[in-house]
Image (cartoon, rainbow, N blue to C red):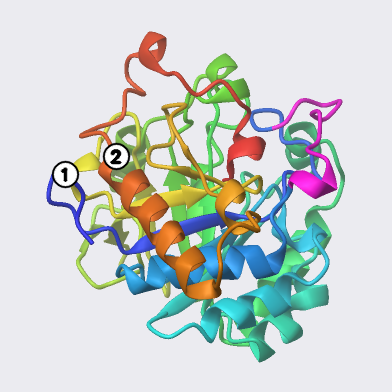
Amino acid sequence: MRDSFGREISYMRISITDRCNLRCHYCMPQKGIELAPAEEILAFEEIVLVCQAAAELGVRDFKITGGEPLVRPGCPELVGMIKKIPGVRQVTLTTNGFFLERYLDKLLENGLDAVNISLDTLNEKLYQQITGFDVLPAVKAGIGYALKKRLKVKINSVLQRGIHDREWMSLAELAKDVPADVRFIEMMPIGLGKKYQGVSGEEVLLNLKEKYPGIKPDETFHGNGPAVYYRIPGFSGSIGFISAVHGQFCGSCNRIRLTAKGELKPCLCYGSSVDIKEIVRNPVYANGEEKREELKNAVREAISRKPERHCFATEEQITEGRQMVQIGG
């Protein structure tokens, strides 16, 4: 299905929880957030109904996110439930990596296609400063196990000025010996992210060009998102950049988001959403077909509301007031 600007919407990010075992200071307050009551969170069966409706409209790729999705029991089984929907091409997962080694075998049994792992530094002291916990060895073990299992791995890093803005070199070199893509994501001015100054993708790329003069664009297909990739000679993996603020890629945006509480968000930086929880839980519909048609209408409405572009560069125009963990990473 295409939106009002002619963009084909084929990708949905699904937050299944607002819980997280870490406290990354640009994502969640150190004391946590007011968590949504369990009854307000969509059940897996309800999520599947939304995915079925979206798939009938041409959404082919789904990413499970949180919070931290692996803190919710049954996450691997949800991957399998979505993977079985007719028309679904790919189901992937974004995680902080702490629980990955524990659950990876079950995720793979259910058909997981790829994993994105958040990792901002390889320095244990800095990692604890950023996340609030000394668990970097467990995250590294999860990455290593995913690579051992030959799962497609992407490592997502958000650099912060004055905190760990020099970590780009050690992070990039993760892609030297293993076939993992390392992506540098610009800090988005959502929630606590407004308090921190990020590092632009352009700055990181200039640094990499200085250190690796042979770096060149990588035009091969890497996935569903907006990252621009480069290849360093001799490296097994590629280096990617998601420059949401300085390199606006709205013209090729192909996604909508489903929050854990059942809101379809057309764009990350605006508060506008379409409530689908009322539809999936409404007993008035006579049968499943009628409910699915209403869900399809809701997905159509969310897609039709997609704005031409975000407004991250003009913070006063941002209308989304929640923390990133409440929206879905």
Name the image quarter holding residue 285: bottom right
| Residue found at the very far left of the displayed protein | 6
Question: What SS does tag 2 mark?
Answer: loop
Membership of 32 in magenta stretch: yes
**Is the C-beta separation of discs 1 and 2 under 8 Å?**
yes
Q: Residue at x 31, y 67 (%)?
A: 57
Label placed on residue 4: 1
Q: Position of residue 321 (x, y in %)?
A: 56, 20
Report the front residue among 286 and 237.
Answer: 286
Q: Position of residue 260 (x, y in %)?
A: 65, 49
Q: Can residue 81 be seen here?
A: yes
| Residue found at the very far top of the displayed protein | 316
Q: Position of residue 51 (x, y in %)?
A: 49, 67
Density class for disc 1 (Cα within 10 Å; few <14, some 14-19, many ≥20) is: few
Q: Residue at x 78, y 38 (%)?
A: 36
- Dot 1 amino acid type: Ser
Q: Residue at x 35, y 73 (%)?
A: 56
Q: Position of residue 159 (x, y in %)?
A: 53, 35
Task: State the CA–CA distance, disc 1 to disc 2.
Answer: 8 Å
Membership of 158 in magenta stretch: no
Q: Which residues are magenta?
A: 28-40
Label placed on residue 54: none
Q: Can residue 176 be seen here?
A: no
- Dot 2 amino acid type: Lys
In the picture, the quarter occupied by the N terminus is: bottom left
Density class for disc 2 (Cα within 10 Å; few <14, some 14-19, many ≥20) is: many
Q: Residue at x 83, y 35 (%)?
A: 132
Q: Is residue 290 above or below residue 6?
A: below
Residue assigned mark 2: 306
Left or right relative to 76: residue 89: left
Report the front residue among 207 and 93.
Answer: 93
